[in-house]
Image (cartoon, rainbow, N blue to C red):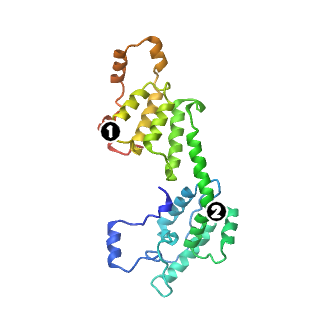
Amino acid sequence: MSFFSNPRRGGRQDAEREIISVPRTQATNLPKESPATLLNIPKLKPESSLTVWGNEIFHVLRPFKLDALVNVDLPRPHPGELNYNRWKFWTLVVAGWLFNQIEAALQLKVKAHSNDLTYADEIFNTIKLLSLHSHSKFVASELKRWEELNHRRFATPADFIMAYQNQFNRLKTEGDDPSCDFALRRLLQELHGEILKVPFIEEEVNNLGRPVDYQLFVHYCKVLVNESRKPSVSLAEYDTLGIDGDLADQSQSSGRDISYRGWRRSTKGHGPAWE
């Protein structure tokens, strides 16, 4: 999930509590002023993912209940309000830490952008703003890398499938992923002649009656990896040996059930697809 969406923390109970309490600000629920060591993350560079970097920022701040400080959608407290001094302490701490999580060249750009940047939310927002162009180029390069993947560049079909899925997941993280239905069909097309069960999987997908979602995409990738590692004859060998349709049907029926229904009935169908 992209950090650009800035999801609000808390669930239904938090929402009900906010209705009857004072309006929420960046100072709400902050910890007491105390020494704290915030872990450093890989510095943001032009060739790195702004989304991954932003998610890491939230990952470090949330355990300390400091993530509200970089949320520009939340108002800052006014001087004299409850916890204002606490907010002032923590926003300066987080602002200094944020500045150290970007490379030196970007630090200079942030300083040149404005001399008045002081608080965590404005520094975080400025870093995002100045990195948008690099981020667009990064996402475009990741999409091109995924589009150029083909099985001939890999030693085994399994290596190709896993690389294909990993690159798709990178695009999904950026929120710029193609549809799972398209991704699976392109993968199957690449594996024609490499894995015997590809035509059967294609037929299965065509008869689903609904588009392929991410869970099914992951499931079929696992099926394809497992099938690629089984010793079996290729489609070309089937044609050479002159195996008739009855035997082919028998091979299909005796093989592993790769259907969505079969997957749901299996033990793996009761949990997340990646387990």
Q: Identify which residue, 110 or 228, lies in the foreground.
A: 110
Q: Quadrant of the C terminus?
A: top left
Q: Residue furthest bottom?
A: 80
Residue 94 is left or right of residue 29, and the answer is: right
Q: Identify which residue, 88 or 45, lies in the foreground.
A: 45
From this view, report whether residue 198 is shown above or below residue 239.
below
User: Crowdedness of circle 2 by 10 Å Cα count: few (<14), some, many (20+)?
Assistant: some
The residue depicted at 36 percent of the width and 25 percent of the height is 255
The residue depicted at 35 percent of the width and 45 percent of the height is 271
On the image, the x and y values in percent for residue 140 come to: 59, 49
On the image, the x and y values in percent for residue 6 come to: 47, 64
Q: Secondary structure at mark 2?
A: loop
Per the image, the residue denoted by label 2 is: 102
From this view, report whether residue 13 is shown above or below residue 219.
below
Q: Secondary structure at mark 1?
A: loop
Q: How many marks?
A: 2
On the image, the x and y values in percent for residue 84 come to: 49, 82
Per the image, the residue denoted by label 1 is: 209
Between disc 2 and disc 1, whose residue precedes? 2
Image depth: mark 2 or mark 1 in front: 1
The residue depicted at 57 percent of the width and 63 percent of the height is 39
Q: Amino acid at mark 2?
A: Ile
